[in-house]
Image (cartoon, rainbow, N blue to C red):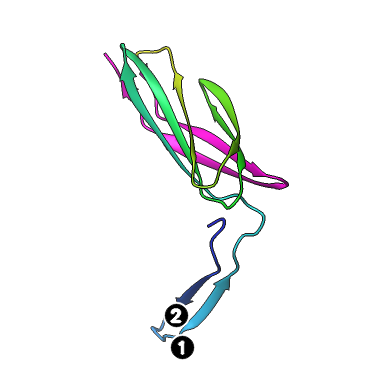
Amino acid sequence: MVGDGAVEVSYRAVDVAGNVSEPLTLSVPAVEGGVSAEVVAKTQCTAGKVLVNVRVVNTDDAPATIKVSTPFGTKTFTGVAPGKSASQTFSSRLGAIEAGSVTVTTTIGDRTSTYTVDYAAASCG
């Protein structure tokens, strides 16, 4: 997880004869240099057309630039403060769409993270 501390995983190995090893621990260090955020994408119907709504919360500790890209458009927000959100609704201009995904890029200085979040198919007919 970007922005979180190290993770420790404990495990045991079992061979084909059923012998079980003593517990071992694998430590995975935190990913450094990323920008943490929470991203939600959902579909909704308005006036018979499918809309894709994307909400991004800056969970990092400094203002971020947030770029939201969908098959229906792109929007960039600058200076999104820690704990604040950026939201954008994109019109598909269609009565039905297949499931898809949005890509969100968050940047603070020279740190960047990219998130891909799925949204559901929708039909407004």
Count every numbered label the image shows and give the total: 2
- Say which residue appears at 47% left-offset and 33% top-offset: 101
Nearest the eye: 29 or 53: 53
Quarter of the image that includes the C terminus: top left
Task: Find disc 2 in the rendering and name its residue.
Answer: 12
Question: Real-space Cα distance between discs 1 and 2?
Answer: 6 Å
Local crowd at mark 2 within 10 Å, few (<14), some, or many (≥20)? few
Marks 1/2 in contact by CB < 8 Å: the verdict is yes
Q: In the drawing, what numbered circle is on residue 110?
A: none
Q: Quadrant of residue 11?
A: bottom left
Please name the residue shown 63% across and 52% down the image.
34
Is 51 positioned to the left or the right of 29 in the image?
left
Residue reaching furthest left?
125
Q: Is residue 61 magenta?
A: no
Q: Residue at x 39, y 13 (%)?
A: 94
The local crowd at label 1, few if under 14, some if 14 to 19, many if 20 or more residues have their Cα within 10 Å, is few
Q: Which residues are magenta?
A: 96-125
Residue type pointed to by label 2: Arg
66 relative to 89, above or below: below
Question: First in sequence: mark 1 or mark 2?
Answer: 2
**How would you classify the magenta stretch by its main secondary structure?**
strand
Say which amino acid is labelled 1.
Glu
- Secondary structure of the residue carrying tag 1 is loop
What SS does tag 2 mark?
loop
Tell me the tag on residue 22: 1
In which quarter of the view is residue 115 placed? top right
